[in-house]
Image (cartoon, rainbow, N blue to C red):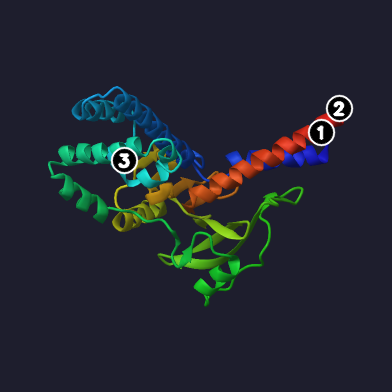
């Protein structure tokens, strides 16, 4: 019974114990993927029926208009989005890329080449945190920050009362300062590969969130999502990078694990692999429990 409770606590904390809107980025990325799958089906069917290109473009524009996703996001993430679908029909995925670029060019009043150049300048590469790139081991992280004093390397605690830890993830951290304020920087590893970094300040208030938000906007541009609840109780900004990687800034003084202000840098591909591993482990655990009933 104790093990079952630990599993339940683990699942609850991983899903709901993070910073404000901790799952918001997952929802947004899934919305982009869903829009792309619909675009793929639309274009593939149109090609089979020999529909004129202008009509396909018109229908794509209508499809994008019915979602919160901008055509720019589809175009920037084309490579990651079409990875599996291109195996079925490369012509359809190529057509989506070309027509989406044309839609963007028309909306911006540019030539196709001009739009492509603008989008190239606007690219946001989220390849890690500072010199620590996604996929490197914890030893490489320490080499990327040679002057910092890291904590011991181990599993993060997910239930302070029982001392339960997350066996799939390893992490360590060091203390730093941003705007003369103390922050903690956590590095998370799955299969000894860096996939997430959290920079957080427990005593962070809403004015601190606002300053960090403006600094991130200056560096990475306008976020794809930005939310502030009434009376500034919660706030969130989300930046989407190439490959569907994200940066999420959150403010939530009542968060269980990360109260205050948190900046999360996330490698979504490895995070998805981690989520699938969790589901498989949970399935096996349930099957083992059912055998005992």
Q: Quadrant of residue 218?
A: bottom left
Give the residue at mark 3. Answer: 94
* CB under 8 Å between discs 1 and 2: yes
Q: CA distance from mark 3 to mark 2?
A: 53 Å
Residue most toward the top? Answer: 49
- In the image, residue 215 sits, relative to residue 5, either above or below, namely below
Give residue 55's position: percent from left, percent from top: 21, 25
Q: Which mark is residue 289?
A: 1
| Category of crowding for the residue at label 3, using alpha-carbon neighbours closer than 10 angstroms: few (below 14), some (14–19), many (at least 20) | some
- In the image, residue 56 sits, relative to residue 71, either above or below, namely above
Q: Nearer the viewer, residue 73 or 262?
A: 73
Q: CA distance from mark 1 to mark 2?
A: 7 Å
Residue 71 shows in this picture: yes
Q: Quadrant of residue 194?
A: bottom right
Give residue 69's position: percent from left, percent from top: 33, 35
Give the residue at mark 2. Answer: 293
Q: In the picture provided, is 280 more to the left or to the right than 97?
A: right
Q: Please name the residue shown 42% across and 34% down the image.
A: 31
Residue most toward the right? Answer: 292
Give residue 253's position: percent from left, percent from top: 51, 46
């Amino acid at each position: 019974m104790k093990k079952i409770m630990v599993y339940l606590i683990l699942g609850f904390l991983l899903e709901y114990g993070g910073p404000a809107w901790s799952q918001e980025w997952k929802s947004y990325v899934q919305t982009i993927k869903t829009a792309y799958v619909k675009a793929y089906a639309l274009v593939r069917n149109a090609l089979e029926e020999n529909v004129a290109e202008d009509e396909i473009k018109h229908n794509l524009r209508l499809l994008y208009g019915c979602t919160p996703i901008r055509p720019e996001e589809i175009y920037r993430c084309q490579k990651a989005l079409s990875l599996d679908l291109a195996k079925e029909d490369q012509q359809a995925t190529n057509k989506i890329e070309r027509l989406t670029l044309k839609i963007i060019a028309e909306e911006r009043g540019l030539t196709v080449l001009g739009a492509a150049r603008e989008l190239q300048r606007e690219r946001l590469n989220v390849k890690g945190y500072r010199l620590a790139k996604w996929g490197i081991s914890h030893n490489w992280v320490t080499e990327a920050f040679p002057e910092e004093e890291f904590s011991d390397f181990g599993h993060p605690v997910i239930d302070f009362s029982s001392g339960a830890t997350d066996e799939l993830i390893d992490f360590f951290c060091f203390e730093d300062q941003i705007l003369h304020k103390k922050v903690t920087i956590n590095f998370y590893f799955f299969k000894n590969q860096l996939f997430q970094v959290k920079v957080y300040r427990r005593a962070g208030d809403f004015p601190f969130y606002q300053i960090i938000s403006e600094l991130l906007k200056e560096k990475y541009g306008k976020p794809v999502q930005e939310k502030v609840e009434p009376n500034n109780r919660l706030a969130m900004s989300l930046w989407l990078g190439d490959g569907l990687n994200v940066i999420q800034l959150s403010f939530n003084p009542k968060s269980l694990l990360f109260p205050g202000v948190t900046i999360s840098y996330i490698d979504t591909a490895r995070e998805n692999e981690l989520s699938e591993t969790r589901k498989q482990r949970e399935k096996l655990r349930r099957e083992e429990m059912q055998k005992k009933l």
